[in-house]
Amino acid sequence: MGKMKAAVYYGPRDIRVESIDIPEVGPTDILLKVDACGICGSDVHSYGTGLYIQKGQVMGHEYSGEVIQVGNEVEGIEVGQRGTAFHSGVCGSCFWCKKAQYTLCPNLFKASTGYGLPGAFAEYIKISNAQRGISFHPIPMDMDKFTAATIEPVGVAAYTVNQCNPQPGDKVVVLGAGLIGNAVMQVFKAKGIETVIVTEVSEPRLELAKQLGATQTINAAKEDVLERIKDLVGVGPYHFNEGAMADIVVDAAGAPAAVEQTFEIVRSGGVIAFVGLPEKKASIDTTKIVHKAPKILGCLGGDMQESIELLSTKKVETKSLITHVFSIDHAKEAFETQMNASESVKVMIEY
């Protein structure tokens, strides 16, 4: 079909824009022309350290595009439809797949969009075995391409909040105000949770969180986070010590210090949800787990349909979180900008 531009990973902080073949579409596949693709936190980890991917990988899984080719066996998807798509490379036969716990399949990242399979930091992307509502999600025609490119991370935020099972009157703390953290905060607010406190070290990110509905914001670089949260949600005494009384704590920062803080911020019997991905290991005092008995969740997954609903009804707003846009020709500059959390929130590549 010809050639296309793509950003190809070669090693830590080494990404090059090259001309590669446009994927060939089989009878069960679709081809999308990519409109915009966001740089995910996991993409930043991959770019900076080599985590999760191998040399030669085309990353990118937060994107929007238009279907330009449909295999003759694909049903319910038509040329001209706009949407987002993600192919999950689960094996279908392992212990977890048999229990329908597909995100736990060991094969997941070996053959998924932007990891083992080519991603959307390219002009075109193929989705194998495309199925409407499963691996391809149509979007409203009036949704702009940048908002549409945040459907996947907002889906992660919605999934995370649902896993936490918030109840009326809960007091929530979100650590980290990147796009995921900001979206988590907004989803909690959309579900009627009045008190949602956001902590972050980046002042621009905190300001956006405040504008988008955070009840309180705390600059973790300048303030004593635990003491501020005690003031805001109450002191939480537990065996031999005292922390805060947050019912739910979501770590969307992925920093070891934030991970360690969650166990002091949460009340005894509360919920801790981890959605951030630390590059370095955190030190965890398991006595706090024994004595406080929190419910600890690892949140890997997303709800794309709820995300589309939240974004299309403006219950979650992400366009203001897009602080920088680059062309594919400047992919390296885009990644370097995304690594600078003090100046960026979400960086997009457009085509």
Image (spheres, grey):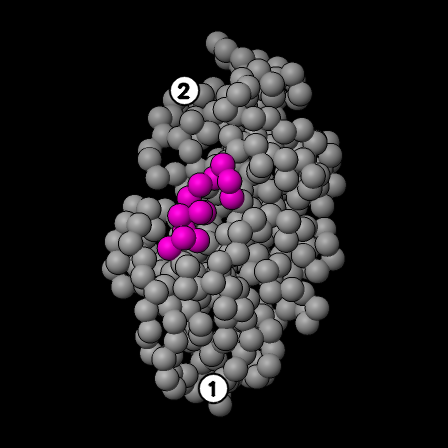
Q: Is residue 247 above or below residue 119?
A: above
Crowd tier of the residue under label 2, counting other residues whose Cα lies within 10 Å: few below 14, some 14–19, many 20 or above: few
Q: Residue at x 39, y 76 (%)?
A: 4
Along the viewing direction, whichever of 332 and 167 lies nearer the viewer:
332
Residue 341 included in the magenta stretch of the image: yes
Residue 315 is situated, as x and y percent measured from the top left of the image, at 72, 51
Task: Name the amino acid type tagged 2.
Answer: Thr
Crowd tier of the residue under label 1, counting other residues whose Cα lies within 10 Å: few below 14, some 14–19, many 20 or above: some
Q: Residue at x 44, y 53 (%)?
A: 334
Left or right relative to 86: residue 247: right
In terms of sequence position, does the residue under pointer 1 or pointer 2 come before the other?
Answer: 1
Q: Which residue is mark 2?
A: 287
Helix, strand or loop at label 2? It is helix
Residue 14 is situated, as x and y percent measured from the top left of the image, at 29, 54
Residue 241 is situated, as x and y percent measured from the top left of the image, at 50, 11
Q: In the rendered image, is residue 242 in sight?
A: yes
Of badges 1 and 2, nearer the viewer stands: 1
Compute the Cα span from label 1 to label 2.
56 Å
Q: Is residue 85 above or below residue 187?
A: below
Residue 266 included in the magenta stretch of the image: no
Magenta highlight range: 332-344
Q: Residue at x 38, y 71 (%)?
A: 5
Q: Is residue 338 above or below residue 16?
A: above
Task: Name the amino acid type tagged 1.
Answer: Gly
Which quadrant, please, contains the N terminus?
bottom left
Along the viewing direction, whichever of 135 and 332 lies nearer the viewer:
332
Location of residue 249 by image quarter: top right
Q: In the rendered image, is residue 306 in sight?
A: no
Q: Which residue is mark 1?
A: 71
Helix, strand or loop at label 1? It is loop
Location of residue 283 by image quarter: top left
Residue 199 is situated, as x and y percent measured from the top left of the image, at 56, 30
